[in-house]
Image: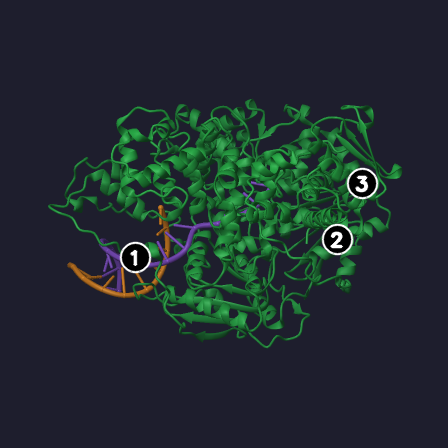
Chain colours: A green, B purple, C orange
DNA sequence: AGAGTTGAGGTTTTT
DNA sequence: CCTCAACTCT
């Protein structure tokens, strides 16, 4: 369990004990002070801004048994400062006193992925402060108490806040945590606790000197070895400040930091542990002058970049990338190409040169396209610079250029770190490698670990190529080691993925692992079924079969290549009664759309959101009543909300409808478009309705998912940066943009608290990387799914962009994608500890054949093949049920109506938001009746590269 | 036998 | 938006 949760639970215990001793939690300052006294701590007050506070608001001085806090704020705020410092005392921060500066009583339990927070993930010290804020909040108002007050005693958030003298935001946040997040179980028995290192690991961890790359397959204990190496370095009395540990993901960085901290807290704080991007950001801030940037540049994310480029796009005179009905998508595609170029440290100028080289070589249109990307690249860099921003790519590529060109800075940094350790080396791209090379040119004391066969991030320039050239082109003279013992899986599974690995293109042949565990008695199983619908039932059957054998739902994972697939599968499993943990796209969810519709009433003159709001049990209205309101609004020029104060003027409104509107009016009272969306929603959920309370007492696993989705939404809404315009409008526009670009993906990350729910985990294979499960199910093992046929990038990289690649860059992409598919399958199989199930339908829904994946045959003879007949039919989805309707007279549709229907019906779900009617729809005359003309013209096949791939193989 | 048509299936990922 | 299976047409 993670440290934040432990601290929170400790605080809740202290609260209970204090109450038992007779202290009054409704007098927070006295309550906190009593706890300080109990532990023998003096609480003293210092003037705000006093020197002893050193710019902070409170401090815990262990050697003097003293808590010092500023003389400012309400009694509750003071109590919060004291409780924060008690947290430091309780959790053993007895080193040098560090004043606490940024104290936020209403901090969400987890950060929302917005802005630079996505990159920095806080240093350990800052995480500690976050932890203390949560500690303090829990001590003053534990979740269990907040929950009881609201759910059982019926107190609103405002009532609790007033009684406690606390800010509304703090109480509301605590209520959200209490009501919407699942209760986290007390520490499960520490699994796979310390196992001693095996000889291979000892050798690898003990290596000193030359560059070293440890090839470590799945389940071989690579993280353990890396941690052991760090401990070894500390034992050798290496100054932890001179150790740099780089990972690719925030998650990996956090885990590593926690792991080190468990053994050596001070060293973990002193060491630099973080992602390449976070490290890069650190360098950018340190050397901002040399880079011509402000001290603390902002991060320009994709959404903002698209926005700004849209303004200048028409003026660029592009020919090939001009003016598709909607420039958004093409701009996003070009930004992807630009980001890819930054992965290779290719700037706009160099990009233009590469395009020119192509033109000279006679590449024709491809060269012109590359030149246009170069033009946009150049423009983008300028506007980004003018906005004092950097983007994700800059975070690594700017420091690389800085270090490669500034000898003095390079020497300075080389001298700063003695040891550089890199996790997940197969995920690094050229810019990361060049950063490493600048820091450790001779590779001395550079130590990396990775597995080329798990290289599934090629789209961003990671490739097994970087693993291959370690020790030769990169860091010549470097050495290699290998871990060959798998501790995770039973031999049956290890043998299967090792057999597959033997013929993989990535990472060379071999790479077979030796299973350390005893036989499990069950080979990996392939279960073939006839139809796709049967596949889901067969999957559900297997899940229940495993559960009957004692495997909890939460110990089983279903892995797919894509999110869309996962989401349909999730709904189908739910219909079959299997609890699943999968939120899907946050903004597609009903409970989230309900709240956004509610917000939209504040800003939409026509109140279109009412259609949805009227379906909620809070404000129930008939369709007729909704129609009456909408007609009324169409006829009258009103401002948003004004109509809610004149409900009697709406013609043909039923009494029930009027009552619902009056309730809605009360729920929205005092708010307008200028209100803070978070406050509006918090007030709705916690003060003016019992929505949150009702959801939180439901025992239904589906409702648990709804709660988590709401929590996620509230966290997102709260984290919205301030800016110009009305906050509600800004939020809704922001959501629209996010969904259009598919950037809401970031919000799918489940909060850590969700991990305790007993439900089957549904994940993409990418999402499952680095995790393991007792039972893994892999549906959809068909020839058209797992080696899939990935699309060519919309803006192909110019030839020569990818370093070390030969041939056309399209070739490079294609080869990389084929390799990546194998890696995906390898990762998927190797997540399983005890049982592995693979499924495929052998037919399409219309009864034609659907061949199985060729990968199955490569798993060797250990794979048990079965044809299964599922136990029951798949229940029909309510939304698929036919709706009976009748009409009178001649049926006719206008062209635009048909076009709209066709576009919505035929577009895959993830495109439904992103494009308007296709150009061919627009061309139709407005009143077409002849439907035959609506057939979409087929495109003439061209004989381009991606069409007949076979001829190139 | 090969060209063309139709319907169904698939289209990820992080900082 | 591309690919495959299975069909029809010549």
Q: Chain of mark 1?
A: A
Q: CA distance from mark 3 to mark 2?
A: 37 Å
**Mark positioned earlier in the residue sequence (3 or 2):** 3
Residue A197, percent from left and from top: 77, 62
Within the image, what quadrant is residue A479 found in? bottom right
Q: Are marks 3 and 2 on the same chain?
A: yes
Q: Which residue is mark 1?
A: A881
Q: Which residue is mark 2?
A: A227
Q: Residues within 10 Å of mark 2 (few under 14, many from 20)?
A: some
Mark 1 or 2: in front is: 1
**Mark positioned earlier in the residue sequence (1 or 3):** 3
Within the image, what quadrant is residue A64 found in? top right
Q: Which label was assigned to residue A426?
A: none
Residue A363, percent from left and from top: 42, 38
**Quarter of the C terminus of chain A within the rendering:** bottom left
Q: Chain of mark 2?
A: A
- In the visual, does A788 lie left or right of A920? right
Q: Which residue is mark 3?
A: A36
């Amino acid at each position: 369990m993670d440290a934040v949760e432990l601290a929170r639970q400790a605080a809740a215990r202290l609260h209970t004990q204090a109450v038992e001793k007779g202290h009054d939690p409704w007098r927070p300052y006295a309550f906190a002070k009593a706890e300080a006294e109990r532990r023998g701590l003096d609480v003293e007050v210092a003037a705000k801004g006093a020197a002893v506070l050193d710019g902070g608001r409170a401090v815990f001085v262990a050697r003097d048994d003293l808590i010092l806090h500023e003389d400012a704020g309400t009694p509750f705020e003071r109590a919060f400062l004291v409780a924060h410092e008690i947290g430091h005392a309780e959790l053993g921060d007895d080193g040098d006193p560090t004043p606490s500066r940024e104290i936020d009583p209403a901090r969400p339990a987890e950060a929302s992925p917005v802005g630079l927070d996505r990159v920095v993930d806080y240093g350990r010290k800052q995480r500690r402060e976050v932890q203390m804020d949560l500690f303090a909040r829990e001590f003053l108002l534990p979740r269990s108490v907040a929950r009881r007050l609201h759910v059982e005693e019926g107190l609103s958030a405002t009532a609790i806040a007033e009684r406690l003298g606390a800010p509304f935001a703090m109480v509301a946040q605590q209520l959200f945590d209490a009501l919407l997040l699942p209760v986290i179980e007390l520490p499960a028995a520490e699994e796979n606790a310390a196992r001693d290192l095996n000889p291979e690991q000892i050798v690898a961890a003990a290596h000193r000197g030359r560059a070293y790359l440890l090839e470590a397959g799945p389940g071989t204990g690579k993280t353990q070895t890396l941690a052991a190496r760090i401990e070894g370095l500390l034992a050798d009395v290496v100054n932890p400040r001179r150790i740099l540990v780089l990972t690719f993901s925030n998650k990996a960085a956090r885990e590593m930091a926690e792991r080190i901290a468990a053994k050596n807290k001070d060293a973990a704080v002193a060491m630099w542990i973080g992602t390449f991007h976070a490290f890069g950001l650190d360098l950018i801030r340190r050397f901002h002058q040399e880079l011509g940037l402000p001290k603390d540049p902002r991060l320009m994310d994709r959404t903002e970049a698209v926005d700004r480029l849209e303004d200048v796009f028409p003026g660029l005179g592009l020919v090939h990338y001009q003016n598709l009905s909607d420039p958004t998508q093409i701009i996003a595609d070009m930004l992807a190409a630009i980001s890819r170029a930054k992965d290779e440290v290719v700037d706009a100028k160099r990009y233009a040169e590469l395009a020119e080289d192509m033109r000279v070589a006679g590449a024709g249109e491809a060269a012109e396209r590359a030149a246009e990307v170069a033009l946009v690249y150049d423009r983008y860099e300028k506007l980004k610079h003018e906005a004092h921003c950097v983007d994700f790519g800059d975070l690594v590529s700017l420091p690389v250029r800085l270090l490669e060109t500034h000898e003095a800075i390079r020497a300075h940094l080389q001298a700063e770190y003695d040891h550089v350790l890199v996790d997940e080396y197969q995920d690094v791209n050229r810019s990361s490698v060049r950063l490493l090379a600048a820091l450790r040119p001779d590779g001395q004391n550079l130590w990396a670990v990775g597995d080329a066969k798990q290289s599934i991030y090629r789209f961003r320039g990671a490739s097994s190529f970087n693993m291959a050239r370690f020790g030769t082109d990169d860091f010549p003279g470097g050495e290699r080691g290998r871990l060959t013992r798998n501790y995770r899986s039973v031999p049956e599974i290890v043998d299967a993925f090792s057999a597959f690995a033997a013929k993989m293109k990535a990472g060379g042949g071999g790479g077979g692992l030796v299973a350390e565990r005893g036989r499990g008695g069950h080979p990996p199983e392939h279960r073939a079924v006839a139809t796709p619908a049967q596949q889901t039932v067969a999957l559900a059957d297997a899940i229940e079969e495993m559960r009957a054998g004692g495997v909890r739902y939460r110990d089983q994972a279903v892995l797919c290549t894509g999110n869309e697939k996962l989401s349909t599968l999730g709904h189908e499993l739910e219909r079959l009664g299997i609890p699943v943990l999968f939120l899907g796209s946050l903004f597609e969810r009903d409970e989230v759309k309900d709240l956004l519709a509610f917000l939209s009433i504040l800003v939409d003159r026509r109140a279109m959101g009412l259609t949805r709001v009227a379906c909620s049990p809070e404000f129930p209205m008939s369709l007729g009543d909704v129609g009456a309101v909408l007609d009324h609004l169409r006829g009258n020029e009103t401002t948003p909300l004004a109509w809610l104060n004149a409900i009697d003027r709406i013609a043909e409104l039923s009494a029930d409808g009027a009552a619902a509107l009056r309730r809605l009016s009360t729920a929205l009272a005092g708010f307008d478009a200028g209100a803070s969306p978070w406050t509006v929603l918090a007030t709705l959920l916690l003060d003016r309705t019992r929505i949150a309370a009702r959801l939180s007492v439901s025992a239904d696993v589906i409702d648990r998912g709804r709660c988590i989705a709401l929590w996620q939404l509230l966290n997102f809404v709260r984290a919205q940066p301030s800016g110009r315009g009305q906050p509600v409008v800004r939020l809704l526009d922001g959501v629209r943009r996010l969904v259009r670009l598919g950037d809401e993906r970031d919000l799918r990350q489940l909060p850590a608290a969700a991990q305790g729910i007993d439900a089957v985990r549904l994940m993409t294979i990418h999402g499952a990387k680095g995790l393991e499960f007792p039972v893994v199910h892999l549906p959809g093992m068909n020839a058209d799914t797992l080696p899939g046929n990935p699309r060519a990038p919309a803006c192909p990289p110019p030839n020569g962009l990818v370093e070390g690649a030969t041939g056309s860059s399209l070739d490079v992409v294609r080869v990389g994608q084929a390799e990546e598919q194998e890696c995906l399958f390898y990762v998927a199989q190797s997540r399983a500890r005890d049982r592995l199930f693979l499924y495929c339908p052998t037919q399409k829904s219309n009864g034609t054949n659907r061949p199985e994946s060729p990968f199955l045959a490569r798993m060797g003879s250990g794979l048990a093949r079965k044809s299964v007949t599922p136990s029951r039919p798949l229940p029909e989805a309510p939304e698929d049920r036919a709706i009976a309707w009748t009409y009178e007279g001649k049926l006719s549709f206008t062209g635009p109506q048909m076009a709209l229907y066709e576009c919505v019906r035929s577009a895959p779900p993830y495109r439904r938001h992103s494009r308007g009617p296709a150009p061919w729809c627009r061309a139709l005359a407005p009143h077409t009746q002849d439907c035959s003309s609506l057939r979409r013209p087929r495109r003439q096949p061209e004989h381009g590269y991606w069409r007949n791939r076979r001829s190139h193989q």
